[in-house]
Image (spheres, grey):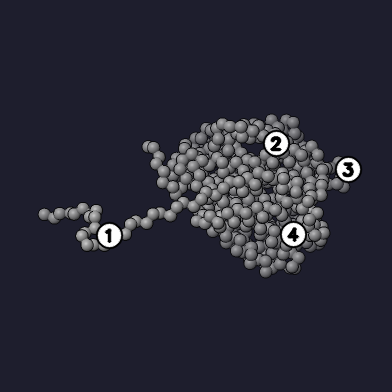
Amino acid sequence: MSVTRAPATEPPPGGVPAAPTPAPPPAPPRLPLWPLALMFGLVPLWWLLGAFYLGWPLLGALLLALLLTRGRVPLPPAIGIWLLFLGIVVVSATQLASPASLLTFALRLAFYLTALVVGVYVYAAARERASLVAVLTPLCAFWFGLVALGWLGVLVPRLAMTTPMEVLLPGGVAGTPFIKDMVHLTTAEYSDRSLNPIYRPAAPFAYTNNYGSAYAMALPCVVAFTMLRRQGILRWALLASLPLSLAPAFLTLNRAMFLSLGAGLAVLGVRASLRGNVRVAASIVGVVVIGAVATLFIPIADLINKRVDSSDTNTDRLSLYTEVIRRVQESPWLGYGAPVNVDTVSAAAPIGTQGQLWMVLFSHGVPALICFLAWFVAAAVICARATSAAGQWLAVVPVVCLVQIPFYGMANQNLAVAFFAVAFAMALTERERRTGAVAAVALPPAGRATAVPA
């Protein structure tokens, strides 16, 4: 009869004691949230200083320094696609027509890199916290700044000021139209040559289209926060801000903003109906009703028609798009490095502007555009796995971005807003898959052994 011996608990006499099992390395310190609050929560201050654009990559550098100091940082899913995009962008610098274009190229590249850093930071910070609500709070602070400055554009649309950043910059740099738009403070966009100008809120951005883009990205995040947090002053303040935000948002007259939000709500509605999620469906109805009531006081359709009739915006855009398609055939792999000014189109804007799709295609080539679009498609697919009401609202953000890409430029702060929302949604979706949607926002983070009651 065979006998199985239990493993010895003591070393045999005269034998060598077994080496002790090494203790697991201590968990790295948690990433602080104050840098995100500094970056997204103090937008009105950065705008007043004229540092909202040029200072944004510096705030991203602060996040990067903290990530490098901490080490062992998890990367969001599909981030390799974005890294490939960045690599192509860097190589496309070889196509720049002149050294003078290097400054604007470097600034756009800095925005692409900053968005990546924000996404990695938010993803890591969300994964290591038991409660996710605090991680989303800086984006809610960004929303409050957006609404407040938007109302400033409504009440004092002609306000313009010289900022400290504008004074500090060399005259040759500050006088460049591209840089001047970034550092010179204005609250609204309008034609000063018109006898009856249409004022469109823009602050804290240089252009009203950027305001509309940011609004459409931030709105789902605000609704998601109110679903994650069922009580508290911040929740009620956000709910109160939703109807207040409609006046500046509607007065931007941004058709792509309405289109992207409509597409996002449609996708959200289909998902809610397929999953039988009554709470999500009710929230959609609430948002739509608030918007419909606002149209009773703001004749948005008439204002948009008046703007279209009094401008050549559609003709200008079509002229630019046609020229991009023609010229990219001559340099399809790496593009031209940056948009260029030519006299062959009717529009005043350079070729390669009036939409992120056209900027990437013209500046960096077809492979870069494929990577840019592929990352947002991958983000939309990954975030669509969310099961909670908050997660489903956040999953709308990459859909909104995909609709905006042909019309709005994203080589600005809005790309970081998108990465913030998507990275948070990815972390929330992962936790839902591990723990269940009901308690996902308050259960243990990934990678930490914590007892959970059955």
Mark 3 or 1 closer to N-term? 1
Residue 400 point in image, percent of width and height = 62, 46
Q: Is residue 426 visible?
A: no
Between label 1 and label 2, give the one nearer the viewer: 1
Say which amino acid is labelled 1. Answer: Pro
Mark 2 and mark 4 residues within 8 Å of each other at the beta carbon: no
Q: Is residue 236 visible?
A: yes
Mark 3 surroundings: few (<14), some (14-19) or many (≥20) residues within 10 A: few
The residue wearing badge 2 is 246
Between label 3 and label 1, give the one nearer the viewer: 1
The residue wearing badge 3 is 195
Cα–Cα span, label 2 and label 4: 33 Å
- Tell me if 230 is positioned left or right of 294 in this view: left
Q: Secondary structure at mark 2?
A: helix
Cα–Cα span, label 1 and label 4: 75 Å
Q: Secondary structure at mark 1?
A: loop
Q: Is residue 169 above or below residue 269?
A: below
Residue 149 point in image, percent of width and height = 73, 41
The residue wearing badge 4 is 351
Q: Is residue 347 above or below residue 302?
A: below
Mark 3 and mark 4 residues within 8 Å of each other at the beta carbon: no
The residue wearing badge 1 is 17
Q: Is residue 339 above or below residue 449?
A: below
Q: Secondary structure at mark 4?
A: loop
Cα–Cα span, label 1 and label 2: 73 Å
Cα–Cα span, label 2 and label 3: 27 Å
Mark 2 or 4 closer to N-term? 2
